[in-house]
Image (cartoon, rainbow, N blue to C red):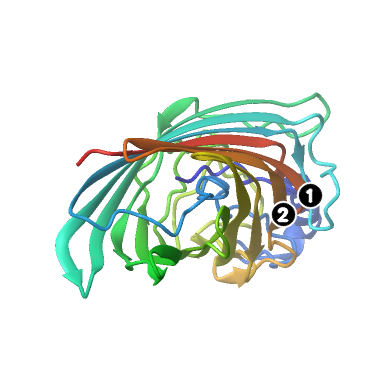
């Protein structure tokens, strides 16, 4: 569920620095400080797509279909200091993503802890426009995104008498570069590289009617030789790039206000652990971070289906495309 939309952040400054130093550099040997940041972590991973009661999941054999719809209105591109990047004028990137998740709980279990498998298939539409006087990034329209798949273990709930008070699920996902990727376009649905994406989802029910949940996620990105619309820079030959590792988490707290209806606050936090690399060289000041918070609502229609709806507003962001986000998650057990 990845959309690479920050590929050329601060590229204007990087190009200026590169041009000034190109005459003193041999081909393919531009310094790391002057090289542009061309391979970056994607924005389209699970940032806020899951929220309320996330630690609970399918434990009996069968299929559950989970449908996500997410809308991002990126109206600012932040630099490494958290300020609006001077490279762009009036950016506007609208991203609409639909993801269908097939979650299968198998008959295999370990003392009541169920083994399952997930497959997530996204379709993403990107529309971009920028003001004159700054960089112009071209979008790739509508296409399939990168497919995510992997096993999970849904642990049996921890009970206090007849009432469940906590539940945990762990998963080890792989993200395959199957999404739309046009080398002539700046903004693509696919990242162009493989990633490992394990997570731990948990829910605590501290008192009747109250719920606290989170999903701690890690992202490791492998090297790639694919890059979208690379600029022609004297003295630089692009061989490979690698986006930095990331640690990020969704979180929420909610209170049931009517039967099956809960209102709450939700958010997510992102922290890139190391700088991006170009041709094996670390690129300074390329770590991204962000914090989003907003309101949400949960509705549980008994055993038939349940739905989460969330709004997220940016609180802080660095090296990040920023703007409001809204998403809906529909969970439908089939059998």
Choose top left, top right, bottom left or bottom right for residue 211: bottom right
> In the drawing, does residue 190 fall left or right of residue 111?
right
Q: Quadrant of the N terminus?
A: top left
Q: Identify the residue at image location x=49%, y=60%.
A: 239
The image quadrant that residue 288 belongs to is: bottom right
In this orientation, which residue lies closer to the viewer: 191 or 35?
191
Residue 315 in the figure: left or right of residue 211: right
Nearer to me, 109 or 29: 109
Residue 240: image location, x then y, percent: 49, 61
Per the image, label 2 sits on a secondary structure element best described as strand
Drawn side of residue 129 relative to residue 228, left or right: right
Q: Residue 25's image quarter?
A: bottom right
Location of mark 2 (residue): 291
Locate residue 122, reporting x and y percent: 39, 37
Answer yes or no: is residue 100 visible. no
Relative to residue 305, is residue 247 depicted above or below?
below
Q: Which of 118 and 127 is in front in this view?
A: 118
Q: Mark 1 points at which residue?
A: 315
Residues packed near mark 2 inside 10 Å, few (<14), some (14 to 19) or many (20 plus):
some
Return the residue found at the far bottom. 111
Whole-percent x, y for residue 19 in the image:
76, 52
Looking at this view, is 230 or 261 the one in front? 261
Q: In which quarter of the image is the C terminus?
A: top left
| First in sequence: mark 2 vs mark 1 | 2
Query: Does 64 sit left or right of 193 as displayed?
Result: left
Whether pointer 2 and pointer 1 mark residues with C-beta atoms closer than 8 Å, the reply is: yes
Q: How crowded is mark 1: few (under 14 residues within 10 Å), some or many (20 or more)?
A: some
The residue at the point 15 percent across, 65 percent down is 108
- Whole-angstrom CA distance, mark 2 to mark 1, is 5 Å
Where is residue 326? Give x, y as percent.
Answer: 61, 34
């Amino acid at each position: 569920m990845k959309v690479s939309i920050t590929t050329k952040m601060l590229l204007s400054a990087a190009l200026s620095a590169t041009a000034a130093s190109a005459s003193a550099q041999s081909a393919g040997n531009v310094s790391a400080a002057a090289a542009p940041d061309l391979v970056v972590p994607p924005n389209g991973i699970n940032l806020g797509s899951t929220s309320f009661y996330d630690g609970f999941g399918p434990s009996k054999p069968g299929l559950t279909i989970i449908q996500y719809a997410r809308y991002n209105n990126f109206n600012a591109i932040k630099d490494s200091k958290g300020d609006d990047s001077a490279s762009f004028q009036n950016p506007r990137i609208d991203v609409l993503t639909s993801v269908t998740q097939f979650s299968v709980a198998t008959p295999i279990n370990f003392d009541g802890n169920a083994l399952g498998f997930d497959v997530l298939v996204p379709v993403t539409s990107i529309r971009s426009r920028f003001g004159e006087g700054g960089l112009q990034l071209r979008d790739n329209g509508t296409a399939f995104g990168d497919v995510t798949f992997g096993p999970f273990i849904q642990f049996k709930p921890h009970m206090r008498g007849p009432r469940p008070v906590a539940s945990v699920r762990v998963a080890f996902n792989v993200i395959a570069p199957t999404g739309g990727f046009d080398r002539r376009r700046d903004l693509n649905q696919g990242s162009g590289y493989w990633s490992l994406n394990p997570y731990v989802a948990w829910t605590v029910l501290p008192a009747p009617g109250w719920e606290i949940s989170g999903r701690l996620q890690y992202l490791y990105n492998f090297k790639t030789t694919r890059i979208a619309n690379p600029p022609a820079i004297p003295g630089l030959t692009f061989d490979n790039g690698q986006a930095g590792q990331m640690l990020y988490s969704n979180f929420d707290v909610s209170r049931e206000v009517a039967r099956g209806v809960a209102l709450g606050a939700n958010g997510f936090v992102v922290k890139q652990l190391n700088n991006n690399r170009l041709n094996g060289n670390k690129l300074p000041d390329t770590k991204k971070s962000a914090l989003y918070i907003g309101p949400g609502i949960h509705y549980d229609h008994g055993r038939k289906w349940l739905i989460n709806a969330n709004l997220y507003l940016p609180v802080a962001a660095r090296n990040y495309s920023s703007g409001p986000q809204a998403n809906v998650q529909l969970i439908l057990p089939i059998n």
